[in-house]
Image (tube, rainbow, N blue to C red):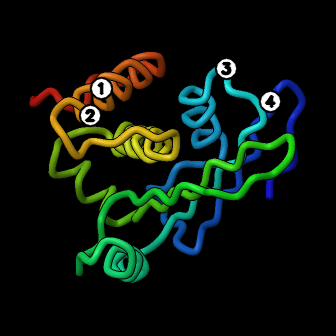
Amino acid sequence: MCPKQENTPLQLDIQRPYDGPEVPGDAQFRQWVQTALAGQDNAMVNIRIVDTDEGRELNRRWRGRDSATNVLSFPASIPLTGMRILGDIVLCAPVVAREAAEQGKPVEHHWAHLTIHGLLHLLGFDHTTAAQAEIMESGEIRLLDQLGIPNPYELK
């Protein structure tokens, strides 16, 4: 677990069972999470970077889908005095890299987008209906814009 940093109430644990060259560093993940959590104190988030096999197994177990997916979010329901435990975000590195290449976007931009997407799920956002998707996507676009990253939903 990362120690609590001064002026930063975020506790961020990044697990890297898969750590290829395309995987961003801890500082990048911290920046993306802090951007999405602006103004929310005492938050704890875990990020796990996985390979295709683990991504597939988790997606099969929790969503009933027999394929690796780019991001999974597991909201926490554990009360802890003084700390808001948001939950876990699992990112499948090979899927993220493949999608970025297919979509013709910088892989770092796709990592940022999916990290923020996963975090918004932990904060209670969803995209199962068109109205929910519009709200969630507009939040993603706004947060990515703060990071200087273009709208991921615009086709090039």
Q: Residues within 10 Å of mark 4 (few under 14, many from 20)?
A: few
Q: Residue at x 61, y 57 (%)?
A: 76
For the residues labelled 3 and 2, the Cα–Cα distance comes to 23 Å
The residue that label 1 is drawn on is 135
State the mark number for residue 8. Answer: 4
For the C terminus, the quadrant is top left
The residue that label 2 is drawn on is 132
- 140 vs 82, left or right, is left
- 14 vs 36, left or right, is right
Vertical comparison of 91 with 150: above or below = below
Image marks 4 and 2: residues in contact by CB distance under 8 Å: no
The residue that label 3 is drawn on is 39
Query: Of residues 154 and 75, which is closer to you in this image?
Result: 75
Image marks 1 and 2: residues in contact by CB distance under 8 Å: yes
Question: Residue type at mark 2?
Answer: Gln
For the residues labelled 3 and 1, the Cα–Cα distance comes to 19 Å
Tell me the element at label 3. loop
Residue 144: image quadrant is top left
